[in-house]
Image: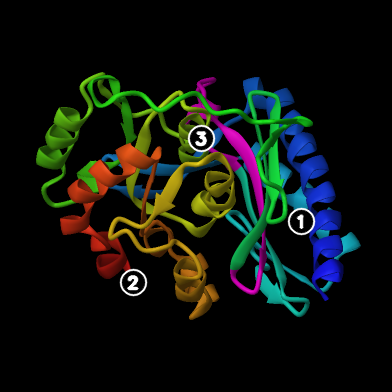
């Protein structure tokens, strides 16, 4: 049974790698002419969509349905999301970091995660023309066909932490100030959470904290973090999955209708020592947006 499951995962990852690369090329080729539209406003922060987001997701979705018709598909821009009947589900972010993408900035990425019964089992991400991938039986993340070797963790006095949209929290300015004190080398806001997390996995950042993400923002990173020695959890220190999957599955149609409902899951992704420090910072504020936006 395990052998058959492993074969099915590898078949899907092979397709996911191809589609992440193709999607990235489509997006990059259309980047200069893309126009962005506001999907939802959260005060001063807006979520955007471009024609490239829609074209990339359409490409990926049509191919999955032609090859694995019984699989579920949940995509950020999709209108026909479902869980399927096979136990496998594809979670797609056609362009993570659309704001960056639409302005010609980095990071942005095309990401695909494959879940089996609510748990991530494979993932493929294309960023800056590089293809990152892994599956549950691999001991590492591949960059192209070579293992990713993370840089050593920085000592506390040299840590640099990424963070996003703390203004969604009632005391966000104060929390951002506190985070800076935990980051002697600085705290940065880069946009594009998947790309920022990849920087953590590579060792270029020591950690990243975010108060409210969607399923597809987190799905591809969890498995990759495990393979590189990084730690990714919710703000209270508990695992991201199956909790996030279970929350989304309660009412998928309702979840997809509201951008506010989608963007509510907090995460901490960091190298091990930095993760322990950041959890002390995040625990008192855990699940705030999940409670407010449920």
Callout 3 environment at 10 Å: few (<14), some (14 to 19), or many (20+)? many
**What residue is pinned by disc 3?**
201
Q: Quadrant of residue 177?
A: top left
Front label number (3 vs 1): 3
How much space separates mark 3 and mark 1, taking CA atoms? 28 Å
Percent position of residue 259, x then y? 43, 58
- Magenta-span inclusion, residue 187: no
Q: Considering depth in this image, is 235 or 211 the residue closer to the camera?
A: 235
Give the side of residue 167 with respect to residue 178, left or right.
right
How much space separates mark 2 and mark 3, taking CA atoms? 30 Å
Above/below status of 55 relative to 291: above
Q: Are marks 3 and 1 in contact (CB under 8 Å)?
A: no
**What residue is pinned by disc 2?**
294
Q: Which residues are magenta?
A: 95-118
For the point 13% across and 38% down, the residue is 173
Give the side of residue 224 with respect to residue 133, left or right.
left
**What residue is pinned by disc 1?**
61
For marks 3 and 1 on the same chain, the one whose residue lies earlier in the sequence: 1
For marks 2 and 1 on the same chain, the one whose residue lies earlier in the sequence: 1
Callout 2 environment at 10 Å: few (<14), some (14 to 19), or many (20+)? few
Residue 23, visible in the rendered structure: yes
Q: Quadrant of residue 207?
A: top left
């Amino acid at each position: 049974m395990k052998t058959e499951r492993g074969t099915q995962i590898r078949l899907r990852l092979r397709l996911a790698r191809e589609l992440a690369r193709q999607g990235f090329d489509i997006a990059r080729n259309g980047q200069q002419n893309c126009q962005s539209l506001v999907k939802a406003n959260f005060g001063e922060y807006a979520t955007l969509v471009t024609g490239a987001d829609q074209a990339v997701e359409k490409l990926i979705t049509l191919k999955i349905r032609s090859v694995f018709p019984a699989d579920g598909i949940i995509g950020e821009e999709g209108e026909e999301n479902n869980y399927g009947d096979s136990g496998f589900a594809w979670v797609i972010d056609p362009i993570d970091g659309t704001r960056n993408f639409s302005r010609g900035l980095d990071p942005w990425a095309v990401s695909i995660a494959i879940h089996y019964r609510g748990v991530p089992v494979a993932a493929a991400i294309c960023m800056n023309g590089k293809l990152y991938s892994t599956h549950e039986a691999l001991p590492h993340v591949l960059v192209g066909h070579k293992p990713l070797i993370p840089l050593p963790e920085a000592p506390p006095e040299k840590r640099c932490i990424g963070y996003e949209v703390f203004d969604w929290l009632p005391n966000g300015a104060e929390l951002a100030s506190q985070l800076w004190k935990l980051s002697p080398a600085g705290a940065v806001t880069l946009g594009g959470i998947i790309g920022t997390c990849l920087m953590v996995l590579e060792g270029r950042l020591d950690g990243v904290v975010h108060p409210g993400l969607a399923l597809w923002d987190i799905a591809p990173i969890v498995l990759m973090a495990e393979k590189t020695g990084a730690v990714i959890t919710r703000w209270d220190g508990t695992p991201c999955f199956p909790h996030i999957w279970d929350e989304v599955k309660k009412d998928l149609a309702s979840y997809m209708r509201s951008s506010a409902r989608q963007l509510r899951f907090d995460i901490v992704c960091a190298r091990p020592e930095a993760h322990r420090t950041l959890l002390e910072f995040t625990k008192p504020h855990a699940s705030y947006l999940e409670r407010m936006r449920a």
